[in-house]
Image: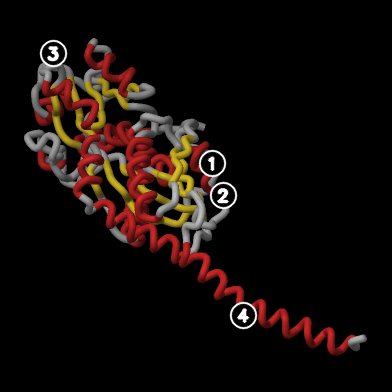
Amino acid sequence: MQNPSFQKRRAAMLAILLGAAAPSLFAQTTRDWPTQPVRIVVPFQAGSATDLITRQIGIGLSKEYGQTFVVENRPGAAAMIGSEAAARAPGDGYTLLMSGPASMVTNRFLYKKLSYDPDAFEKVAVVAYTPNILLSSPDLPFKTLPEMIAYAKANPGKLTYASFGAGTTSHMAGEMLKALAGIDIVHVPYKGAGDAIPALLSGQVSMYFDTIMTGLPYVKAGKLRALGVSNSKRSPMAPDIPTIAEQGYPGYDIAPWYGIVAPKGTPADVVNKLNVSINKLLKDPGFREKLAATGAEPRGGSVADFSAMVGAEIPRTEKLVKQSGISLQ
């Protein structure tokens, strides 16, 4: 029978050996990631722009790693339901979130209490962005953005603009234009393009910040006018439509973006591995063509670039929300 002192020494030695092995086993696990299916939570409904882009990313990553990347739609509450589900998941690399301005930036200023922490994520990579265009009815007495600004100044409070929801990027685009141009136009929120476009076509509202994918066909058909593109560069889909910035409002740059994030604590090796893969995918001509079909333009960049982008948007959005007086809860 072994004496107690020998048993204690053996237990101590075993603990040391296990402790030394743990980092090696962990490194092995992250190096081999993924060894099982990965879910990408989408905080919007199936068929939305976010959903379509995420599915293309999932297909590309599945081919890259030989593991299934499953899209899980968790819509509702301004992206909070899906964001909360992802934030509470283990940081093991097997849950990701396709985030955007609502989940990472805007919600923190619109709601007094969030069900998740917008900062409780590891940034992975910005995938793409979708330009918005400011649409107007051809029946109104202006054809260009400068003419609209002049009309709005001469008729404060008369013009209205629709968005696809209070606090959305299309709403913030209107608030930014109001602030930079010094005009008084009235916000009218809708649930999406399915409601806002008919309202604009029927004359219920004067203007609408819509995604270029859904709005451009109406411009080409002559049913609506395009006054300007919301981000800093002209869109390849409509190179003849000038940006709002180049029409006298430098610094005007706002558009919905889509970025992959992971729960806090996800290993840096996994985050960096994903970042490299996503950037590689964004350079693939076939993938870029599929993105273009959704109206999105590839973005990419490093983890640091993603963090810097969000960091720059936070104070700007806070200022816009305060100026607009929005409060949803």
> Which residue is the site of mark 2?
89
Tell me which residue sits at (49%, 56%) in the image. Answer: 93
Q: CA distance from mark 1 to mark 4?
A: 40 Å
> Which residue is the site of mark 4?
20
Tell me which residue sits at (30%, 20%) in the image. Answer: 196
Give the numbered dot on residue 139: 3
Q: What element does badge 1 sit on?
A: loop
Spot occupied by residue 72 in the image (x, y as percentages of width and height) = 48, 38
Q: Is residue 305 above or below residue 71?
A: below
At label 3, which amino acid type do we have?
A: Asp
* Labelled pair 4, 3 in contact (Cβ < 8 Å): no
Label 4 environment density (alpha carbons within 10 Å; few <14, some 14–19, many ≥20): few
| Residue situated furthest right in the rendering | 1
Spot occupied by residue 137 in the image (x, y as percentages of width and height) = 17, 17
Tell me which residue sits at (32%, 31%) in the image. Answer: 171
Mark 4 and mark 3 lie on one chain; the one further toward the N terminus is: 4
